Image: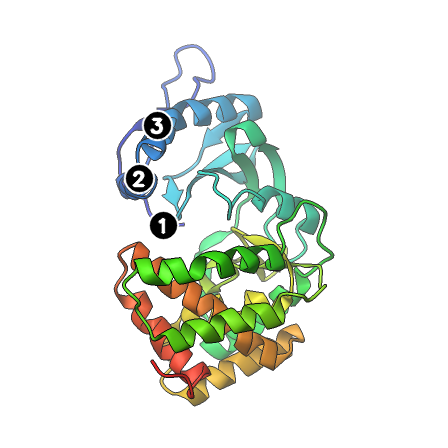
């Protein structure tokens, strides 16, 4: 979550006669980014957000307890419920975030933030309050990678039915990747595209069915009181756990100065999570190419350069 500015005042229900109305402000940056990303549907959702929050405040008897924070697809409001500190999260639901509450229910607070209650129609969740000021970004990268690898393994419980699989995800990617490559101006040689398509064909038949948190990165692990470090904002698939490593490579990229640094980080994560290093390399190549093309389509400039460098280190024999 990031800090708050003001726009679209959001009023909680009064708690009794003559009590002032508490005003909560949706961060302007969140409004701007959501509308830019989602268009008219995003703008309509933003306009509904005050009413949704008011309903949840009333339903769960919540009192605001600090400024609104935000991430990529949701706002997080510190609240108090019956004297206990919680946070209310309301998210824009897309394919990647649709199963967040399911994952949190399955984990039951083991290695992840606790989900106390949810309102599926409103995409609202009442969550344990963690220390958003302390993330794994504040820990030396080698130790942070070790902790993240341990959490990746700990969260890899048997996946329940209904969770989209890695095989489904990459099968869909295999079908659209050549078109996306063309649409983004052929940003890398066809040889790399063929390598990735081949890797998908070779790797997808795996029958592994553990939960893979594909968005477990250093800023998504917060300090807690029950446990030292807890995961937030999961985006889960069912399949190879090695599929969940790539984001731990492209985050804190600036601390990777040589190919040896990348190898060391992959080794730390793989050892902590009990992973096959060759499969980590292969799945990370696939995901880096996917992220490279997505970043270009979003207008990002720095991330595609990082992807190029990481792939060059992972696959030095492939022309870039």
Lower position in the chain sequence, tag 1 or tag 2:
1
Quadrant of the rendered image containing residue 158:
bottom right
| Identity of the residue drawn at 36% across and 32% down | 41
Left of 251 or right of it: where is 30? left
Quadrant of the rendered image containing residue 60:
top right
**Secondary structure at numbered mark 1:** loop
On residue 44, the disc is: 3
| 234 and 182: which is toward the camera | 182
Q: Which marked residue is nearer to the observer: mark 1 or mark 3?
A: 3
Q: Residues within 10 Å of mark 1 (few under 14, many from 20)?
A: some
**Secondary structure at numbered mark 2:** loop
For label 1, the residue is 2
On residue 182, the disc is: none
Q: Which marked residue is nearer to the observer: mark 3 or mark 2?
A: 3
Lower position in the chain sequence, tag 3 or tag 2:
2
| Contact, mark 1 vs mark 2 (Cβ under 8 Å) | yes
Left of 200 or right of it: where is 292? left
For label 2, the residue is 27
| Identity of the residue drawn at 64% across and 43% down | 102
| Contact, mark 1 vs mark 3 (Cβ under 8 Å) | no
| 132 and 278: which is toward the camera | 278
Residue 205: x, y in percent? 67, 66
Q: Residues within 10 Å of mark 2 (few under 14, many from 20)?
A: many
Quadrant of the rendered image containing residue 69:
top left
Left of 84 or right of it: where is 44? left
């Amino acid at each position: 979550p990031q800090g708050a500015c003001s726009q679209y005042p959001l009023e909680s229900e009064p708690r009794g006669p003559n009590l002032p109305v508490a005003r909560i402000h949706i961060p302007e940056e969140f409004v701007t980014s959501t509308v830019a990303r989602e268009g008219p549907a995003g703008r309509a959702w933003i306009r509904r957000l005050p009413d949704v929050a008011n309903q949840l405040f009333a339903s769960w008897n919540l009192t605001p307890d600090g400024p609104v924070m935000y991430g990529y697809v949701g706002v997080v409001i510190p609240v108090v419920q019956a004297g206990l500190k919680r946070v209310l999260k309301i998210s824009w639901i897309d394919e990647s975030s649709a199963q967040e509450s399911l994952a949190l229910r399955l984990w039951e607070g083991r290695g992840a933030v606790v989900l106390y209650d949810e309102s599926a129609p409103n995409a609202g969740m009442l969550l344990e309050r963690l220390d958003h000021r302390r993330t794994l970004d504040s820990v030396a990268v080698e130790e942070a990678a070790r902790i993240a690898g341990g959490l990746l393994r700990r969260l890899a419980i048997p996946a329940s039915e209904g969770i989209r699989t890695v095989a489904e995800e990459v099968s869909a990617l295999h079908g659209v990747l050549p078109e996306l490559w063309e649409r983004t101006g052929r940003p890398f040689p066809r040889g790399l595209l063929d390598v990735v398509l081949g890797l998908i064909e070779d790797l997808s038949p795996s029958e592994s069915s553990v939960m893979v948190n594909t968005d477990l990165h250093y800023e998504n692990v917060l300090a807690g009181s029950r446990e030292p470090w807890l995961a937030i904002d999961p985006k889960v698939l069912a399949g190879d756990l090695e599929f969940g490593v790539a984001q731990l490579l492209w985050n804190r990229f600036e601390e990777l100065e040589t190919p040896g640094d990348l190898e060391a980080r992959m080794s730390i994560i793989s050892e902590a999570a009990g992973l096959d290093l060759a499969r980590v390399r292969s799945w990370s190549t696939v995901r880096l190419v996917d992220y490279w093309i997505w970043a270009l389509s979003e207008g990002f400039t720095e991330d595609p350069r990082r992807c190029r460098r990481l792939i060059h280190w992972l696959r030095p024999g492939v022309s870039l």
